[in-house]
Amino acid sequence: MSSELEKIYKENKRGRYTYWVCSIALLIFGAILMLLHAWFVSIILWGISGLWFVILFRSLKEIAGNICQIAQVNPTRLNPETKRHENIAERVSIMALVLPIIEYLDKKFNSHVLITGDSGIGKTTLMKFLIKMKKKFSKETIVVFNFSPHDLYVKTSDSIIDVSKNAPDPFRDIGAFSSAYATAYHIAPDKVGYMARQISSVLNNALMRSKNFADLIKNLDNVRGGKDDVAQGILNQIRQLETKSKTLTSLDLSKDVVYDFSKFTFTEGKVFWAETILNMIWNVAKEKKQSLIIICDEAQHLVVMPTTKINEFLKEGRRLGVSIYASTQSYAMIDGGIRSNFATKFVFRTDDDEALNQLRALGANLEEVAHFARGEFTDVGFPELKKFVPIFYLVENEKDFSNIEEIESKIENEEKIEWKEETSSEEIIVNEEPDEAFVKEEETLRNKILGVLDKSDTSLAISRVAKALYKESMEKDEQNKVKLLVNNEINKLVKEDILDKQSLINERKKGKKESHVFRRNENLSKFHVTLQNRSVKLLKANNITILNEATHHSGTQGVDITLDFCDVEIETGLKDSLGLFDKSLMENTKPVIIVVPNYEQKERYSYLPSVQNGKAKCVLLPELIQAVKEFMK
């Protein structure tokens, strides 16, 4: 047991003991008064004592409506044959311990909370529980940023502001406008150099002469033109952001409120207006320290850029009295520097390879995260994570859960959600069963990994490489060992420049990353084939007619996928110079959609003049269909 956690549990138990002592003392005092014939007072004291006993008995019986530690993952397990501890992680069930969540969070070095995990796994339920506990035991004002229509978060307050109809005035602070624009459209001058600085310069010059969107559009229109036409690209984006709504001139942070951004139909609009309101909150918090909790679902929209105001809240939150509660599907998507500013990091089950790799780096025990049941989670910010990994569970229904045996039974019997691979041209079948020594002999394992990759016409996710090496008879512990060994060996092969590894945003779950590996070569063709195959499959699934599909990826002229009203180019990030590529986009007779594998490449390609002026659009796989529909209009 962690000393910190044990201290919290002891304090909780000490409070119960005090309750018992007081009840018994009242009972004895009532008996003495009865002997002295003070019947009336004696009956009252006995009644109070009996009531306390009933309340205490119920509190001991009930764990419903609380977060409980129900198990832990120890770094070693006892071998019953040798009677020695082996370095193999073992999950051990324990008696359910109610975690006093408010005290637990208060003991951390800051009050920020990050919640990550696959979709439908329990993140929203946990966030709502934390909001409920804070409302019950604390005095902080709850400010919710809601990005999804019909989301449960809109029910957390009676005060709901539809930002599309009540937008703030972003022209009151030019610096805040520029920062919000940079975050929404991924402008990072320190990373991309000249083009980003030029965009910022053109925008700021126009902003200094503008009091509203009409002025800004007019000023940008006056300076547009020329070869690169940066102003035209900014103009197209500003027209999207313009809103005719009433102006939200001030913020009332004295009561709970939900800012609803779900009516904006494009991500950039949601991010821009969210950043604008965050800047307004920042200015209010600086002038007058006020206890606030900012709840942000779909946090990936805001925390992938260094320009986001969230960064400053994370760093200065304690001084300002502001806490950030953020939720997102991918642990790996959030920059490590940003994650480190969250003292509490609740992690639910995930099968994101990159996320699991980062969790393993914190401790081998965290491998168990991939096998959590729905509703189970741990805290990666746990003080003594190296000693053991606590497994928590939010118990909601007192009828279903009255003790640890019932909880564990329900979790063990619950069908775990596994990522089911779709049968496709990427499916790999390995007929040869690995021999018993393959997990021990590095050279044999290396050859088998390369053999699986060589048999495939596409790149493969690391998890799929591991699955290709499983035996059907393997137990889960053995599979975990294989997965870990395969991952370590692949990292060695990448360092030796034998393999290349790239992240790919899965089209089926936006925000979820897969780590793909393939033989290193000159043109990354296998990764290109994967991205193109998935794009084609996505287009066909949405009944979009494909006129032509390229069958080679040697760098010759010609687009990868031809549609009626636009073309699709697949870009994996190979090109060192984008000048010629951008020229071909500008000369193309139809608009072009550039499909890239991850956010890093999207950021890189988004600064092309052809993208800035609207001739082309850069998207991830989950955004492809929406982009096609926009060009269809």
Image (spheres, rainbow, N blue to C red):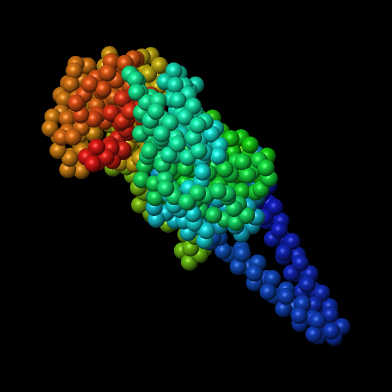
Quadrant in the picture for the C terminus: top left
User: Does 598 sit above or below residue 263?
Assistant: above
Q: Quadrant of residue 14?
A: bottom right
User: Does 630 sit above or below residue 68?
Assistant: above
- Which residue occupies 17% across, 43% down? 543
Taking the image as drawn, is residue 8 in sight? yes
* Percent of width and height locating residue 425: 19, 32
Q: Count the marks: how many? A: 0
**Extreme-left residue of the structure:** 547
In the displayed structure image, the side of residue 264 where residue 532 appears, left or right: left
- Which residue occupies 29% across, 20% down? 582
**Extreme-right residue of the structure:** 36
Taking the image as drawn, is residue 93 in sight? no
Q: Nearer the viewer, residue 365 or 172?
A: 172
Q: Nearer the viewer, residue 507 or 331?
A: 507
In the displayed structure image, the side of residue 324 where residue 45 appears, left or right: right
Q: Quadrant of residue 471?
A: top left
User: Does 586 sit above or below residue 620?
Assistant: above
* Percent of width and height locating residue 290: 66, 48
* Percent of width and height locating residue 318: 66, 40
* Percent of width and height locating residue 330: 43, 38
- Which residue occupies 77% across, 77% down? 45
Q: Nearer the viewer, residue 116 or 55?
A: 116
- Which residue occupies 47% across, 21% down? 197
Quadrant in the picture for the N terminus: top right
